[in-house]
Amino acid sequence: MERLIDASLKAIGSVFAPGMFGVFVMSVLFTLAALLLFVLGVTSVVSLLVGGAVLSASWTWLSGVGATMLAYFLFPGIMPVFVNFFDSKIATLIEAQDYPNAQPINPPFWPEFRHDVRFSLMAVGLNILVLPFYLLPGINLVIFYVLNGHLLGKEFFVMVARRYLPLHEAVRLRKTHGRSVFIGGILLTVLATVPFLNLLAPFWGIALMTHLYHSLAATPKVEVLPPA
């Protein structure tokens, strides 16, 4: 838990690491453009399906509001797809400042992108599946943050760890320290649902898991010798 707290505090400073602002601007523009295309796509489909100029205009406006709310609601699940275009650059800037001796292997982009698309489809699908429970006051927040905290913690940690380890080893390290990764995922989910601050969420999430990974990777392994 101490490692997670330390990584969380370090991540705040890493968001403002040298060179990060340019990446942040590109990421925000890319994210906003993708979300805008999503909203425009939904409203266009509704305007084509609903007949009548007045009725169409009303439904188009309502569908735009609904699509905006849906995009906001699903943002935590689709965030890994957006950050995949910038995660390596973000981690590199953090490592240049805090871990100059790091030697990442940087896996190929497209296999990683396909992995993140599959994850986002699964995350969005699970959120839609439990949608009826989101209508229950009180329990809805618990389900939302637990589900997305688990998903985001796992995905962001493995996203960082696989820059150094084969995928199966990255997954094993995540499972070994599952509680810290899970709590970190909940913190990331909370940030991802705060208006305006959610634009910083991908940066803080990568920074958090980068610091957490290096802290865990630096932990000396204790060899248990068999009894004589």
Image: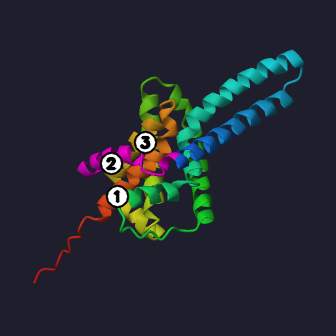
Label whose residue precedes the other's in the sequence (3 or 2) = 2
Q: Quadrant of residue 227?
A: bottom left
Name the spot of residue 49 as percent of width and height, x first: 84, 30
Find the residue positioned furthest to the right: 52
Residue at 42% of width from left, 25% of height from top? 138
Report how far apart the C-alphas of labels 3 and 2 lie in the structure: 14 Å
Residue pushed farthest bottom?
Answer: 228
| Frontmost residue, 228 versus 72 | 72
Labelled pair 2, 1 in contact (Cβ < 8 Å): yes
Which class describes the residues within 10 Å of circle 1: few (<14), some (14-19), or many (20+)? some
Tell me the residue that label 3 is attached to.
188
Q: Position of residue 81 (x, y in %)?
A: 59, 50
Horizontal placement of 10 versus 142: left or right?
Answer: left
Which-is-in-front pick, marks 3 and 2? 2
User: Which mark is on residue 10?
Assistant: 2
The residue mark sitting in front, 1 or 3, is 1
The reply to whether residue 150 is visible in this rendering is no
Q: CA distance from mark 2 to mark 1?
A: 10 Å
**Which one is earlier in the sequence, the residue at label 2 or at label 1?**
2
The span picked out in magenta is 1-21
- Left or right: 83 in relation to 156: right
Position in image of residue 30 (x %, y %): 63, 44
Which numbered disc flags the more N-terminal residue, 1 or 3?
1
